[in-house]
Image (cartoon, grey):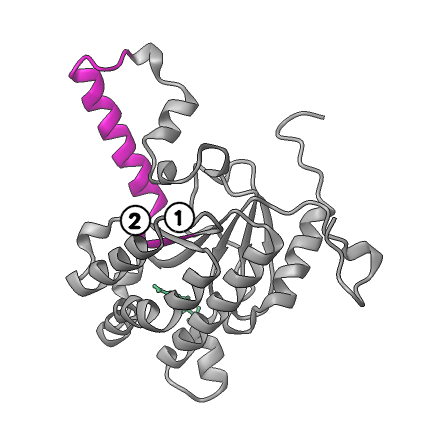
Amino acid sequence: MFTFKKRKQSESLDKIPAHIGIIMDGNGRWAKKRMQPRVFGHKAGMDALQEVTIAASGLGVKVLTVYAFSTENWSRPEDEVKFIMNLPVEFFDKYVPELHKNNVRVQIIGETSRLPQATFDAMERAREKTKHNSGLILNFALNYGGRAEITNAVKLIAQDVLDAKLNPGDITEDLIASYLMTNNLPYLYRDPDLIIRTSGELRLSNFLPWQSAYSEFYFTPVLWPDFKKDELIKAIAEYNHRHRRFGGV
Ligand code: FPP
């Protein structure tokens, strides 16, 4: 059982969600409040992500899937997109060494073939460097969109039926899940137990729509750069008060 000094009894953390998904929202507003350009918020967001990853790893979380860039984010101003696409390069140099020391394994989901080459290469280097680590999996959703993921899975399944590798009768929920991008995760941890969204927005925004069917949701007004270890603990404490029934009673 995990308890923390000075925490109320009601905040004991008996159940640690194995897979947490995070929609890291509010970087732009955080920067604006400080009269800084939006990219300043994304930089601070990287620091928050590092702290939350290491805290989650210490608490025994197995997978952290973070929404870093959606397929819709390309419509942002060109300079901002360029900046975000350069973050993985900085991520590799500045953040990966500490993650590696903490036994964190970096993985990635999304339409990675459409990323700029340098972005793709930096993420690949992070994946390659940490691939033998056995601790928390930090799973980046980068150029990810949930409906596109499901559409792609349907195409692959249809093709396998056409090629007589599969009968329509073989199509089960488990089979569909095996065609989704989260098939890069250990079987037991493919679906998030808890999804956190910061900055007061109450939407899923195309983040893991299939995988979140039974997830618990935690929304907080805290802007992502301010979401640190204590906020993660609050979210997990709230999760501990939920009764997950998976459709049962
Ligand atoms: C949402 O805030 C945040 C993003 C679109 C980018 C988040 C990315 C990171 C924190 C770093 C990711 C790290 C790597 C290595 C790729 P927003 O800009 O929508 O904020 P706003 O809603 O206040 O405008």
Mark 2–mark 1 Cα distance, whole angstroms, equals: 12 Å
Image mark count: 2
- x, y percent for residue 66: 43, 56
Horizontal side, residue 9 vs residue 146: left or right:
right
**Residue 152 on the magenta span:** yes
Task: Locate residue 67, reporting x and y percent.
Answer: 41, 56
Inspect the image, locate mark 1, and give the three-letter code of the amino acid beneath it.
Asn
Q: Which residue lies under the disc numbered 1?
A: 206
Residue 110 tag number? 2
Instruction: Write down the region rendered in magenta.
Output: 138-167
Q: Quadrant of residue 138?
A: bottom left
Residue beneath the point at 61% across and 66% down: 229
- Please, is residue 60 above or below residue 190 in the view? below
User: Which residue lies at the image location 41% right of the left edge and 40% below the top edge?
Assistant: 185
Please tell me which residue lies in front, 214 or 66.
Answer: 66
Give the residue displayed 29% in from the left and 42% down from the top.
Answer: 148
Helix, strand or loop at disc 2?
loop
Q: Give the quarter of the image for residue 166.
A: top left
Residue toward you, 21 or 139: 139
Which numbered mark, 2 or 1, is in the foreground of this view?
A: 2
Q: Name the element at disc 1.
A: loop
Rendered image: mark on residue 115 = none
Do the CB atoms of the residues marked 2 and 1 lie less than 8 Å apart? no
Task: Report the amino acid beneath label 2.
Answer: Gly
**First reached walking from the N terminus: tag 2 or tag 1:** 2
* Residue 42 image-quadrant placement: bottom left
Residue 71: tell me if it is visible: no
